[in-house]
Amino acid sequence: MNRSSYVRAVMTLLIGTIMAAVIAACGSTETVTVVETVIVTEKGDTITVVATVIVTEKGDTITVVATPTSVPVESAPDPQSGNDTVELVASNQVGLTMSGLNNVGAPDGAYSIAEGFFQPCGPVGADIVCPVLAEEWDVANDLSKVTVTLKKGVQFHGGWGEMTADDVVWSFNDLISTSSVHSQSGDYSANFAEMIKIDDYTVEVPIKTYTVVWNQALFNTFAGTNGTFSKKAFDDKGKDWVLTNVIATGPYMLKDFRPQEVISLESFAGHHTQPAPMKFVNLRDVPEESTRLAMLKNGQADVADISLKRINDLREMGFKTSDSGKAAQMAVIMAGNYWEENDYNCSIGQSSVQCPDIVPGTPQLVDSDREGYTPDAEHPWIGEYGDDESMERARKVRQAMALALDTDLMNETLLDGLGWELYMNSFSTKDPNWNAKWEWSQNIEEAKRLLDEAGYPAEIGRGKYRFQVKLYATPHAGGPGGTAGEIQSAIGAMWGAIGIPTTLERQDYTVWRPTVVERSQNQPFLSACGGTDARDSVPWDFPKGVTYSSLSRGGFSCAMEIPFVLEKHLEASGETDRNRRVEINTELAEFYAHEWLVPGITVVPSPLVWNPKKIKSWEMRANAGATHIVSLDTIIPAN
């Protein structure tokens, strides 16, 4: 029983005791005066309750004093680790690799190991652009390139020398290479060509498609920047060595890494700005939440990633929480709607996986490989672009699949009411530009009617169904083993209730991810897909939809390529007037609301719970990146 529940129970018990005493002393026909005093005091791990009741009868006074009661109450424990060490436990946050190569998904700022050009200046609401490795920057008047002057004197971990343009260029070009599996390879390759060294402290980034938020949504840890790593370490030690040794420039350096077990960090005394105040941080992978919770309560863990439904109880025990503002817009992504016939990059004379040997500046009309484009009876949510009847049937199916879902119930039961409404991916209901006309709620009868109209009636008899679905959950919001997995199960049950049997896919993300890179994925999935698109803290005017278009060919996608989304992304990216960008994205919101391509489930915040006996304060910088475990270098020790 938590602290507030206990106090409420004690108060109720006292009232019952008082009433019984009054009746016994006075009888039902006497006039009495009742005066009561209830004192609730707290000391250490106990709550003491004292009650005094005065009953007056015909001038006589009867005093009833309740016996003081002391009851143990759970509170934040004494930490078991040393004052200079934080033990952090989480699920699905320690992966199979931790390397100094961007193309295999190196740590790009999340754990304060690697750095890029920029980072947010503070928490949500602060300026997003503060220079880190950049000192000066300039965008060409014709929007053809960005020139960046690098900070001098920045040292790599482990005595690997000073960072120069050679390291920055090598790190970035490794990220956008065709072999890259970096989570933002598609975002960067859609907007930029290979970086060029001008001199030891100056680099040039050629622009393929200009975006006004190039130093906010990209090249910035706000949304997961590209890390900078030591080229000398790669040249001297080789690829195999840097696959397990991260040589970067951040306030923490990698001390130890054991796949899917632990990431151990040590403050870098030679950091160019300020070493991390907490000397050591150990991030341990603990899949079972019950274990993480027990470790937090007994002092084995100082910080824990805990599901939202337990947060309120932990706060009442005295634990604190920190949040970077990263709230994941969890939506159902109606995969397989690859409506673009041609690779846009090739059409503007840019190299792509569809035209790797193109002569730059020479446009080619190249058909896109679309293995996942299957607008057939087994994939009724996928419309055949250009066929109005097929497109309308698919739209009705997508709408019906959304209306079958009780999103309010999921928020209340699975998130303890700490989430909030989401009706479509990419657009926050908290933004002043939100329009209530886009809102919807569960309507089972309407969902059934739409499915019947679309040609998928409910069959009668055992084993009959409308159609079948396989539903995957990406690592966002705890992934299959966390909150996302619980939402995934709820969606599957609700679809099953209207005749859509749903198989819950649980394969590893490293197995699933290539299907969206290759554009072979054609099953709906639960995700905060789209990079900054699906972060609730991202401003309305940010250009959206790059991973919903062929712009990201060769990199990650949200398993659809939509011509209208591409058009709006290009318009917003090149528009310098913020008000006009808001108008452009409002047009995109109207489109999403009508097409039901990305129906929202809920917005899931990502607070981390910490013990105030170990940590004095932890103010996280604003974040819209892939992980919520960020700003480790801002942890201030309690002692």
Image (cartoon, grey):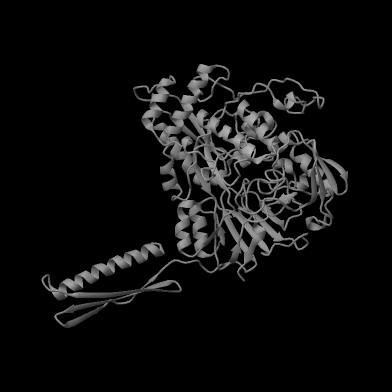
Using the image as rendered, state which of residue 343 and residue 470 is in the foreground. Answer: 343
Using the image as rendered, state which of residue 422 and residue 200 is in the foreground. Answer: 422
Residue that extends furthest to the right in the rendered view of this protein = 199
> Above or below — where is 367 with respect to 596?
above
Q: Is residue 201 left or right of residue 251?
A: right
Q: Percent position (x, y) of residue 78?
A: 53, 69
Is residue 465 visible to us here?
no
Quadrant of the rendering where the C terminus is positioned? bottom right
Q: Is residue 504 left or right of residue 354?
A: left
Q: Is residue 27 left or right of residue 301?
A: left
**Residue at left offset 53%, top offset 17%:** 388
Using the image as rendered, state which of residue 136 and residue 340 is in the foreground. Answer: 136
**Residue at left offset 40%, top offset 65%:** 3
**Residue at left offset 43%, top offset 19%:** 455
> Above or below — where is 575 with respect to 358?
below
Quadrant of the rendering where the N terminus is positioned? bottom left
> Above or below — where is 99 with respect to 45?
above
Callout count: 0
Q: Is residue 629 left or right of residue 270?
A: left
Q: Percent position (x, y) of residue 551?
A: 69, 31
**Residue at left offset 50%, top offset 52%:** 289
Q: Percent position (x, y) of residue 367?
A: 69, 20
* Quarter residue 444 falls in: top left
Q: Percent position (x, y) of residue 449?
A: 38, 25
Residue that extends furthest to the left in the rendered view of this protein = 29
* Quarter residue 636 falls in: bottom right
Using the image as rendered, state which of residue 433 and residue 86 is in the foreground. Answer: 433
Is residue 592 visible to us here?
yes
Residue that extends furthest to the bottom in the rendered view of this protein = 60
